[in-house]
Amino acid sequence: MTDTNKYRDKFPAKNPDGTNIIDLESHKFVKVWQGPQHPGITGNMALELILQGDEVMSCKTHVGYLHRGFEKLMERRKFIQCFPLVCRIAVPEPDFNEYCFAASVEELAGIEIPETAKWMRTLILEMSRLTSFLMWIGGQSGAFGLGIVGQWSNLIRDYMLDRFEELTGGRIYRMFILPGGVRGLLPDGFEGRMEETLKSVETAMNDIERTMFSNSIFKRRAVGLGVIDPAWVDQYGIVGPNARAAGVPKDVRKDYPYLKYPELDFDVITATESDAYTRTYLRAKEIRLSVDLIRQLLAKMPKDGEFMAKMPNMLHWKIPKGETYVRAECTRGEYGYYTVTDGSGYPRRVNVRGPSYTHAVALMEKLAIDCNIADTAGLMTSLHTYPPEIER
Amino acid sequence: MKELLKDLTKRYGLSALYEQRPDEMFATVKKEDAVALITYLQGQEGFTHLVLLTAVDWIEDGQFQLTYMLNNPSKKVDLGIRVMLDRTDPVMESIHHLWKQAATYQRELKEMFGIDFPNSPRIDEPFILEGWHDIPPYRRDFDTKKYSEETYFPRPGRVTHDPAEYMKKKLYPEEGND
Amino acid sequence: MSLKDLDKRMVTGPDGEQFEVDPMQDYFCGEVPKVHKASSIKIWENFLNWARSESLWILGYGTGCGAIEMRPLMTPRFDAYRFGVQWRPTPRQSNVFVIGGYMSVKTLKRVIRSYEQMQGPKFVLGLGSCTINGGMYWDSYNTINRLDHYLPVDVYITGCMPRPEAILAGVEELKKLIKAGKGEGQNKYAENFEWYKANQKKIIKNWDMPDYNW
């Protein structure tokens, strides 16, 4: 974004430590709430902004509109009863919750899952990443005024949800990954239909890239917006595409390989500077990568075999005392479950670490300063935050 | 990592070392030495990524267990530091000067468990709940079902079965009540 | 915001003039909602009901999980626009409120405020099983169990999540209801206003809304 303000060195007035001087009584500052009911907020969160003219002087985020007390509810349910509950924590990509919880429970109980189940789990996780990215790109372009991209990408996402429905029986909440393996195998003819869907994803992505990345309005608004310094990555716990765009190659699939990712052939995508434009560009490349990974998986995976290990009676299952942390790479970064068991049939404590916890609260408050109010929506979507996983 | 932990045990008095996976270990440290240990790990040993900060309520021992999960991005290992706090007076030193994101975790712990971190930024502002006047909800002595039945109007007609008893009656109806 | 901001005080305006500000009076509306009777001319009332049912504009507020199945409705595959259904960003321009799933106490306060700002005749659709009996979160300390004790609901759509086709069927049901003259949610709210407010005040203790300083 080119800065044409010639009073920039005097305005806004700054304190010695770099923060802006705010005086609400002087009537030059206006406090507004970009509240929970707003088309420019991803999900249900509120931003309390103090503006001077058009520019944001300070920003505070307010969360808690979607708090259901998951971690408390899980303490009252047996392990198998937690699974329908757990997928509703991060609504657009529920499979990562199921995978992380199942993996941590299996690790504490000492259960090995069969090979076919590992391939099926990897396939489900990659399909889930693809649908989540497609929904996100519609939101990102809509925040800058390009509404047509949302129509295309949500339509293609619907075809992917059809594939999910064929495989698991559910469009949104699939509950396919259970402790011990998965619930079933691929139906007949699945590969052919999946290939058709992937081709239509690629055609739509060609159109989307041509519309978005050559658009001069998108470029002028998004370039230079919300720049993340690589030195902040550890201070703020930035993970996922936000960190990779700044040049820090953090990818859980390569750093802590899990399931069948070591047998797939891919590189970690990084870029040089993390502003809204580059993050969008990087995520568009990740969509292509997901399509490629799904093709590799369908070519390499065994089509039959055991998909569920021999499990004890789920209603009387007790897991020995222990604690562990399991992570996975979701679209936004590192998603982790910290599970503590105490030898009874109920989990003692489950803590969900969502990547938006740090992105949407501490990082957003830092990045929104000196930003135009019309661009805060675009900034929020470019950080790819989902409020349900902040307050669970 | 085992050599590192042996070295740290001598200097900081770690106890209850436990290896969960080859790249994940847990250790308990006393409350007074915890922040010094974490500062050393962040500064000198390369554990620069704070994964999470959470608490577990061991009500039968009268303790809160705080877990600091640290991660070394270059060596790719995890270390979980456990700190035991007294349940009747849970106060712990804040680490917001080490990581800016720690302030958010500490706000949530204050609201949900009642563990105080003095001088953490915005620690007293309500984070998730609004207008909450009961005990901190994640403690084990808070009964969420009872609270929900009293405050929100449950629709009558709900019947709850214990899943094990229900399945037994369904599969073996002729064996009677055993 | 501090509580002393709610006191009556004298404020100097930008032009230097002094005027008195009473936030409690200015923020909160003192009037109760009124009951609006149907017109006595039957043909006119039928025409109005037909017009209301064919142009249902939904407020774009995704209160819970259910919001994720509203996005496919805007795409060409399910296409709610051919039914006259549009999504509007502000409550002043909409007349259907779709409550998508569970509601926490914090959201309930904002939803009531948005509902009261909508212009009549207005209708409420409850999506999912969480609005009927609390659903999956029935024992949670932060979600409400029965929506119709806080807001008047016209049509419930079951499911977890309801498919987009189910939501369209629910909209169709609402249209039939309106054309038969039974879309009386707003009047029910006005007639039983004390009862609804007592239920709301039981769980929402603090009615301060986020402030603005102008």
Image: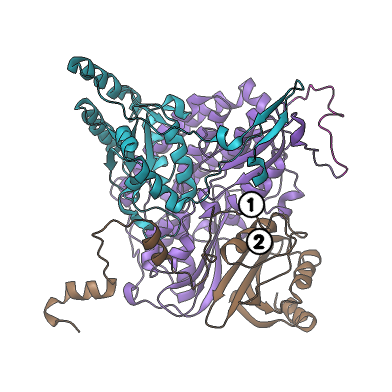
Chain colours: A purple, B brown, C cyan
Badge nearest the viewer, 2 or 1: 2
Q: Give A269 or C158, whichever is nearer the viewer.
A: C158
Q: Residue at horizontal 43%, vertical 73%?
A: A111
How many circles with numbers are drawn on the protein? 2
Q: Residue at x 74, y 59 (%)?
A: B96
Residue shown at 28% from the left, 56% from the top: B155
Chain bearing tag 2 is B
Q: Which residue is mark 1?
A: A358
Residue C89, image x and y in percent? 48, 28
Residue B65 pos. (x, y %):
61, 74
Mark number displayed over residue A3: none
Q: Position of residue B104 (x, y in %)?
A: 65, 56
Which amino acid, by three-letter code, is at mark 1? Thr
Q: Is residue A270 visible?
A: no
Query: For mark 1, does the 10 Å Cα neighbourhood hold few (<14), some (14 to 19), or many (20 or more) residues?
Result: many
- Residue A57 placement, left or right of B90: right
Going by the numbered disc 2, the residue's amino acid type is Gln
From the image, tell me which residue sits under label 2: B106
Magenta residue span: A2-16
Picture quarter with the N terminus of chain C: top right
Residue A345 placement, left or right of A368: left
User: Is B86 placed above or below C188 here?
Assistant: below
Q: Is residue A3 magenta?
A: yes
x and y, in percent, of residue C34 in the image: 36, 30
- Residue A367 seen from this side: yes
In this rendering, do the residues under marks 2 and 1 share a single chain? no
